[in-house]
Amino acid sequence: MGNIEYTSCNIIEHGFDAQINQINLCCRTSKNNIDKYVLIDNYHGQKIDWDDFFRKTNRLREIQKSGNTVPSCEGCIYLEKKLWNDENYINTININNWIKCNANCIYCDRSNFLKEKEYKIYPIIKDLINKNLLRNPADITIAGGEPTITSDFDKTIKILVKNNISTIRVLTNAIKYNKNIELGLKKGLVNILISTDSATKDTFKKIKLTDAHNKVWKNITKYVHNQAQDNLVKTKYIIITGINDNQEELNDFVKMNAASGVKYAYVDIEVERFMNNINNTEYLKRLYKLYINTKETGEQYGVKIQAFDRMKIAEEKIN
């Protein structure tokens, strides 16, 4: 075993996506929007045979080593050429449990999964740790619906923090404040990303369909106060055509971040509208200009604004 140079990514090499009813290879944005590669179908929490799991992922590695690309990964912005370690271990996990949420965002298709049964993530993480298969440095993302209200979120965060696994990223709406996130922030092991998608109560309610604007920004400020360094709490603004795609709201978003002590924020594009307009240059240019203007406003207020997934693709297409 050793290091070999070729084009791949951390998910292909050492990771997986825990999706509802499936263990997939990935959940990231592909330029071609091809269906995701399924590693374990009809998954409902049963014990994972890691030897069999690695046999499957090693076949995908071989495709990448040959100079070809796994079909579901074609055009992905996360592919990179570098030296890859060919040992069998896990250091990249995306956890996407869409069962529970305390908001009802208009761009989210969570309603498709409401009848599904939630499976436990904690036993998977515990098994990996017990078998010394979960390695640092790690990149673990725990996402939605709203992960903090799932049944074993706190147990999962606790075991990861106890074993000094870093980095643990939580995508939360911050409607509910979580003390285990706070502990992870204090230790510098956890970072969080909060999509507020707005700067005013009215816009927040239009998008989230819940009246929690003030509560969310209060919790953001509290999380910022408890972070070990100034880049652990970040926010995100997903641009939705016809609702929040105006410069005034984006500029106010920057000001809300500055007032709460947030130093880093992202701007993205809502996925369905983006995919419907992926070859619409004028559409992409207009939204990209909003991002550039917001970035300039951020410089004035000490908030670093960065492009997120689909805005990155728009940037590549335009430039």
Image (cartoon, rainbow, N blue to C red):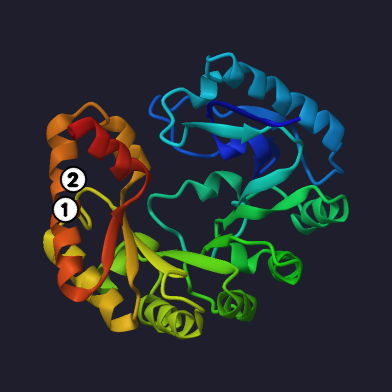
Q: Quadrant of the N terminus?
A: top right
Instruction: Please report contact status of discs 2 and 1: CB closer than 8 Å, yes or no.
Output: yes
Q: Residue at x 58, y 39 (%)?
A: 10
Q: Against 45, is 297 above or below?
A: below
Residue 65 percent location from the top left of the image: 60, 19
Residue 288 percent location from the top left of the image: 18, 45
Residue 71 percent location from the top left of the image: 53, 18
Q: Residue at x 40, y 84 (%)?
A: 218
The amino acid type, in three-letter code, at marker 2 is: Tyr
Q: Against 161, is 124 above or below?
A: above
SS of the residue under disc 2: helix
The answer to whether residue 154 is left or right of residue 105 is right
| Disc 2 from disc 1: Cα separation | 6 Å
Residue 149 lies in quadrant:
bottom right
Which residue matches tag 2? 288
SS of the residue under disc 1: helix
Which residue matches tag 1? 292
Q: Quadrant of the C terminus?
A: top left
Residue 31 lies in quadrant:
top left
The amino acid type, in three-letter code, at marker 1 is: Ile
The answer to whether residue 242 is left or right of residue 83 is left
Q: Residue at x 46, y 22 (%)?
A: 74
Q: Against 48, is 40 above or below?
A: above
Q: Nearer the viewer, residue 137 or 24?
A: 137
Q: Nearer the viewer, residue 122 or 84?
A: 84
The answer to whether residue 120 is left or right of residue 99 is right
Q: Residue at x 59, y 78 (%)?
A: 178
Badge 1: how crowded within 10 Å, few (<14), some, or many (20+)? some
Query: Is any part of residue 74 visible from this angle?
Result: yes
Q: Against 210, is 113 above or below?
A: above
